[in-house]
Image: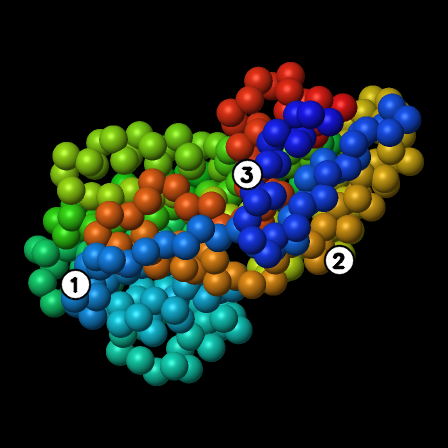
């Protein structure tokens, strides 16, 4: 297809990268673009904030995944790190490993971003730990999040609310609570969104809704904080399911069983069990998909916290998803639908 060729030409010329374009055959649509390498734009550190060692950063969702890796990495960079962990009171494995570092610059704190009481407790912990609270806290990384799957008619309202409470309202709650400290430091807010905060995907509406919301919230906050010297960045990771253990075959089956049991009878009859099981089987194939290397995400957050002029948005994702995001956000919907849906 001429469209695919035109879209792919600039990236196809990148040395050492391979591009495969598949056309439509016999009236069927197949994957159009595929890249074998990860796409992580090189970030320069020509000018960094200084000194890092005097700066405090709070990261949410540090029990596992990005948050766990971020806490360790930022600690190694010299930051005073407060690692918010949902499972601290229950002695989670991630908490134990972070605590085992026995560093006075890395402190785990009990934090459920859905609980205003726990959030305010952490604000007091951070404030009392700062050498000069009047100078504020340098950075907040809103990383805590949950995900689920299911087509709109398969997803309960409780599920929509649960995902939004963590991903969206948790981000808003944390930001509002820590802004007074961050404003004083003229610091940074870094919100972890997703490529699914820029483009929709079938069976992911609960997650997409919240990440679209995080994007809008971040933009509004960036406009408001600009005259106050606070910089706001959004990190939009691609597919890192394999690296973050977001889903497992067991968790998918458990979600599917409850989903089917809770469906209205009319939905069960209209779609049928065969259709439902096919969708679940497709989700199973995603369990081990994506990159296992979280370093592009870690590097993006680090740049957002340390560069004198951080980027508004970071896109740690492979070429396929990066190009797909450009197509879906910049071209008419009819074009992206023709390529990716029909």
Q: Residues within 10 Å of mark 3 (few under 14, many from 20)?
A: few
Q: Note whether 45 is above or below 20 in the view shown.
A: below
Kindly identify the residue that appears in the image at 20 percent across and 43 percent down. 230
Direction from residue 277 to residue 129 in the image, left or right? left
The local secondary structure at tag 1 comes to loop
Front-most of residues 112 and 292: 292
**Image depth: mark 3 or mark 1 in front:** 3
Residue 316 in sight? yes
Task: Please report whichever mark, 2 or 1, sits nearer to the chain's N-terminal start.
Answer: 1
**Residue 326 % position (x, y):** 53, 32
Task: Please report whichever mark, 3 or 1, sits nearer to the chain's N-terminal start.
Answer: 3
Residue matched to label 3 = 10
Disc 2/disc 1 C-alpha distance (Å): 46 Å
The local secondary structure at tag 2 comes to helix
The local secondary structure at tag 3 comes to helix
**Image depth: mark 3 or mark 2 in front:** 3
Quarter location, residue 232 = top left
Residue matched to label 2 = 250
Q: Quadrant of the C terminus?
A: top right
Q: Quadrant of the N terminus?
A: top right
- Quick check: marks 3 and 2 in contact, CB under 8 Å? no
Kindly identify the residue that appears in the image at 41 percent across and 54 percent down. 42
How many marks can you see? 3
Direction from residue 17 to residue 138 in the image, left or right? left
Kindly identify the residue that appears in the image at 57 percent across and 18 percent down. 332
Direction from residue 325 to residue 221 in the image, left or right? left
């Amino acid at each position: 297809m001429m469209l695919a060729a035109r879209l792919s030409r600039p990236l196809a010329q990148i040395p050492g990268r391979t591009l495969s374009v598949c056309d439509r055959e016999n009236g069927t649509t197949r994957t159009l673009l595929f890249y074998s390498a990860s796409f992580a734009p090189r970030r320069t550190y020509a000018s960094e904030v200084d000194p890092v060692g005097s700066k405090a950063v709070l990261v949410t969702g540090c029990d596992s995944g990005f948050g766990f890796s971020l806490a360790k990495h930022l600690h190694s960079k010299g930051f005073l790190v407060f690692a918010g962990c949902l499972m601290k009171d229950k002695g989670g494995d991630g908490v134990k490993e972070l605590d085992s570092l026995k560093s006075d610059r890395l402190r785990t704190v009990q934090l459920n971003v859905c609980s205003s009481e726990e959030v305010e407790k952490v604000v007091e912990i951070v404030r009392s730990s700062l050498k000069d609270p009047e100078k504020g806290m340098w950075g907040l990384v809103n990383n805590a999040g949950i995900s689920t799957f299911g087509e709109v008619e398969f997803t309960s309202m409780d599920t929509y609310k649960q995902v939004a409470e963590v991903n969206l309202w948790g981000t808003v709650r944390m930001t509002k609570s820590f802004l007074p400290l961050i404003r004083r430091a003229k610091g940074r807010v870094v919100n972890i969104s997703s490529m699914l905060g820029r483009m929709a995907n079938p069976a992911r509406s609960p997650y997409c809704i919240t990440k679209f919301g995080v994007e809008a919230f971040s933009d509004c906050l960036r406009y408001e904080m600009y005259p106050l010297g606070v910089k706001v960045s959004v990190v939009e990771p691609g597919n890192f399911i394999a690296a973050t253990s977001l889903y497992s075959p067991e968790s998918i089956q458990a979600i599917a069983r409850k989903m089917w049991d809770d469906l209205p009878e009319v939905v069960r009859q209209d779609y049928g069990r065969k259709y439902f099981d096919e969708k679940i089987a497709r989700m199973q194939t995603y369990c081990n998909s994506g990159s296992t290397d979280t370093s592009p995400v870690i590097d993006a957050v680090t740049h957002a916290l340390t560069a004198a002029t951080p980027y508004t948005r970071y896109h740690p994702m492979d070429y396929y998803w990066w190009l797909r995001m450009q197509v879906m956000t910049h071209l008419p919907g009819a074009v992206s639908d023709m390529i990716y849906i029909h």
